[in-house]
Image (spheres, grey):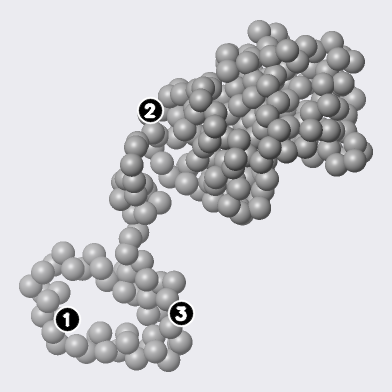
């Protein structure tokens, strides 16, 4: 596998436009390109949702790479640029199509995955679901555009889960996580830390007057007071009730 660092610097000098009508650049940040070059140098099989200058870096690294994007013309521009700078693309498998339709059909595991496709909700979540299922334990997932709330939802989940270890934050925009063990099967929602606050009824759209009345009723209700004295474990519900009525 080749050293991608010189290719990154060449990309930053050339600033090749691949997107839209051939004049637009929706690039990952320079720091993210350098991170991908380092990670790809130690990977054999890689996956990318989206395409662009990052695809050039994967090609330069010589990984067996899959890029998923619905725009064939962008693939053609990437291949043309790679030919101009002497980067072979024989190892790049361009999969034309929307990621929610292409990713479920992938059957191989990967060492490194980049999620940088459609950003409208729920695409980042869907892309994460399928890409994470193809990531081998010990592999790294790179999430771009974390400040966008639809992407940030995935980032928040990953930061909370012990199976996902944060290994790098780049340019206040991208995050890399290592998968430390196999993902669970089934629906273990109760084990996920993002669900640790259940039940939480603070989302209920109660008018302010109703909140005040219910709070006062709870404070005066003798049955609730006796139950709290007899069953101290009920005290752990008090913060939840306070969030509901405050």
Q: Are marks 1 and 2 in contact (CB under 8 Å)?
A: no
Q: Is residue 200 above or below residue 221?
A: above
Q: Give the mark, 1 or 2, whose residue is nearer the N terminus.
A: 2
Q: Is residue 185 above or below residue 201?
A: above
Q: Residue at x 27, y 71 (%)?
A: 238
In the image, 245 versus 111, the foreground residue is 111
Q: Is residue 145 above or below residue 181?
A: below
Quarter occupied by the C terminus: bottom left
The answer to whether residue 98 is left or right of residue 109 is right
**At which x and y percent is residue 84?**
90, 15
The answer to whether residue 36 is left or right of residue 71 is left
- Which residue appears farthest toward the left when viewing the image? 230
Q: Residue at x 90, y 25 (%)?
A: 14
Task: Name the residue tied to disc 3.
Answer: 205
- Among the 4 quarters of the image, the one containing residue 145: top right
In the image, 185 versus 1, the foreground residue is 185
Q: Secondary structure at mark 3?
A: loop
Task: Name the residue tied to disc 1.
Answer: 224
Task: Name the residue tied to disc 2.
Answer: 181
Q: Residue at x 58, y 29 (%)?
A: 113
The answer to whether residue 12 is left or right of residue 157 is right
**At which x and y percent is residue 57?**
73, 21
Task: Report the mark closest to the observer, 1 or 3.
Answer: 3
Q: Residues within 10 Å of mark 1 (few under 14, many from 20)?
A: some
Q: Residue at x 55, y 45 (%)?
A: 126
Q: Residues within 10 Å of mark 2 (few under 14, many from 20)?
A: few
Is residue 136 something one can see in this rendering? yes
Q: Residues within 10 Å of mark 3 (few under 14, many from 20)?
A: few
**At which x and y percent is residue 59?**
72, 17
Q: Give the mark, 2 or 3, whose residue is nearer the N terminus.
A: 2
């Amino acid at each position: 596998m080749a050293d991608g660092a010189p290719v990154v610097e060449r990309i930053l000098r050339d600033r090749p436009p691949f997107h839209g009508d051939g004049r637009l650049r929706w690039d990952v940040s320079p720091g993210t390109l350098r991170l991908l070059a380092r990670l790809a140098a130690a990977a054999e099989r890689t996956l990318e949702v989206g395409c662009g200058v990052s695809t050039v870096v994967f090609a330069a690294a010589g990984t067996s790479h899959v890029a998923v994007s619905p725009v064939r013309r962008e693939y053609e521009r990437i291949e043309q640029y790679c030919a101009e700078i002497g980067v072979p693309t024989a190892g790049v498998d361009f999969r034309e199509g929307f990621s929610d339709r292409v990713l479920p059909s992938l059957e191989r595991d990967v060492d490194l995955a980049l999620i940088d496709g459609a950003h409208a909700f729920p695409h980042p979540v869907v892309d994460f679901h399928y890409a994470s299922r193809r990531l081998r334990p010990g592999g790294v997932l790179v999430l771009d555009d974390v400040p966008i709330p639809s992407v940030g939802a995935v980032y928040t989940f990953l930061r909370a889960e012990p199976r996902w270890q944060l290994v790098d934050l780049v340019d206040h925009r991208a995050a890399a996580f290592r998968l430390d063990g196999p993902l669970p099967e089934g629906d273990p929602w109760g084990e996920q830390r993002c669900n640790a606050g259940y039940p939480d009824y603070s989302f209920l759209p109660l008018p302010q007057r109703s909140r005040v009345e219910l709070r006062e009723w709870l404070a005066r209700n003798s049955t609730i007071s006796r139950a709290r004295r007899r069953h101290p474990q009920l005290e752990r519900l008090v913060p939840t009730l306070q969030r509901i009525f405050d």
